[in-house]
Image (cartoon, helix red, strand yellow):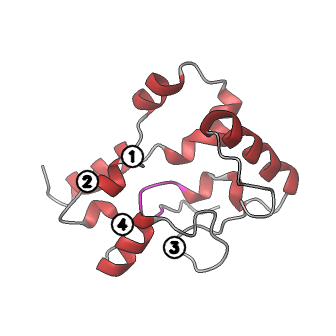
Amino acid sequence: MKKELSRCGYRCDLCAARSDDPEVRQQLVDGWRKYFGYQNYTVENVRCDGCLHDGHLADKNCPVRACVIEKGIKNCAHCLEFPCDRLEKLMLSDEELYERYGDIPVEDYKLCFRMFINRPRLMKIWTDLGNL
């Protein structure tokens, strides 16, 4: 699958919510319940095509997605207000992840977290655009 960066810098192509396999999506739901306490996700509603698309969305009310669309920019790193309070709540690095959750089994990291490590990705884009 081709690398796909969401509007907030998540890697949609790494997310199990894109899987057609309900067993994989169930594992994701179970992991999100365990680590994040998300109780509203099910195998059916966690299905996501990524926020660059208008199909299935796991988070239909994402304020970052709406903001990026409204501003007509590619992603948050292209915004003059980067990083704003809306985005800051969603930004994560590996260091921050381990500070919050401690040691995470590799399989749980791959399933539940790796797609969300967006701080380094967005900072690189922001810097490559000439910002410091």
Q: Nearer the viewer, mark 1 or mark 4?
A: 1
Q: Which residues are magenta?
A: 6-11
- By secondary structure, the bulk of the magenta-drawn segment is best described as loop
Percent position of residue 93, x then y: 41, 36
Q: Residue at x 85, y 57 (%)?
A: 21
Q: Which mark's residue is nearer the viewer, 3 or 1? A: 1
| In the foreground, 72 or 126 | 72
**Residue 68 is covered by the magenta coloring:** no
Front label number (2 vs 3): 2
The first of marks 3 and 4 along the sequence is 3
Q: Quadrant of residue 75?
A: bottom left
Query: Dividing the picture into quarters, in which one does residue 35 lie?
Result: top right
> Marks 2 and 4, how far apart in space?
11 Å
Q: Residue flagged by tag 2: what amino acid is it?
A: Pro
Which residue is at a point 29% across and 56% down the rendered structure image?
125
Q: Which mark is residue 91?
A: 1
Residue with the mark numbered 4? 75
Crowding around mark 2 (Cα neighbors within 10 Å: few <14, some 14 to 19, many 20+) is: some
* Residue type at numbered disc 3: Leu
Asked whether the viewer can see residue 72, the reply is no
Spatial CA distance of label 3 from label 1 is 18 Å
**Residue for badge 2:** 83
Residue 52's disc number: 3
